[in-house]
Image (tube, rainbow, N blue to C red):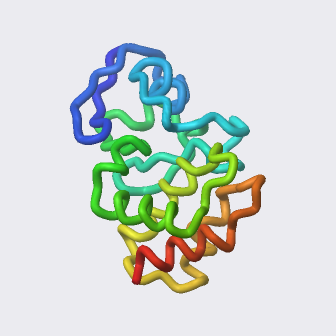
Amino acid sequence: MAISLTVNGKKRQVEGDPAKPLLWVLREDLDLVGTKFGCGAGLCGACTVHVDGQAVRSCQTLLGDVKGAAVTTIEGAAATDVGKRIAASWIAQDVPQCGYCQAGQIMSATALLSQTPKPTDEDIDAAMIGNLCRCSTYVRIRAAIKATAA
């Protein structure tokens, strides 16, 4: 079945099973490998992408659910103003350690800052709660979000 969607600003048509997780469509069919597989259960946040501006877990979002939607991956977020600013803050705050969770962390942070340009600590906690970092860089993640908002 052919499903049309917009990925990183480009119209795409994907031939595939509507029940296939968006994560695997992005990685296998569209060769956008910045979105990572973490747990496969939507619990870790490594696979976070934006669908119509909302942060979602792509491992739990089905291709059929995004028919006609606008999907933004880490590759597309890097081209936005907020994405560029958060990436600069990420580096300035020395956030990355192993780096595996970073794409999902950045996608959640850019969704937050796009919707709430001056987030409170509570806003940051609510937006980032589902993104796990095994290296425990949470303090630096919060600092990078606050620096970007400043």
Q: Residue at x 53, y 32 (%)?
A: 23
Q: Residue at x 50, y 79 (%)?
A: 146
Task: Tell me where residue 88 sits by quadrant.
Answer: bottom left
- Please name whichever residue, 90 or 65, is drawn nearer the observer in this view of the structure: 90
**Residue 10, horizontal then vertical, whole percent:** 22, 34
Image quadrant for the C terminus?
bottom left
Image quadrant for the N terminus?
top left
Q: Residue at x 46, y 78 (%)?
A: 147
- Please name whichever residue, 112 or 67, is drawn nearer the observer in this view of the structure: 112
Q: Residue at x 51, y 59 (%)?
A: 108
**Residue 66, horizontal then vertical, whole percent:** 39, 37
Q: Is residue 110 above or below residue 118?
A: above
**Residue 53, horizontal then vertical, whole percent:** 36, 56
- Please name whichever residue, 115 or 36, is drawn nearer the observer in this view of the structure: 36
**Residue 33, horizontal then vertical, whole percent:** 49, 30
Q: Is residue 64 above or below residue 9?
A: above
Q: Is residue 30 above or below residue 99?
A: above
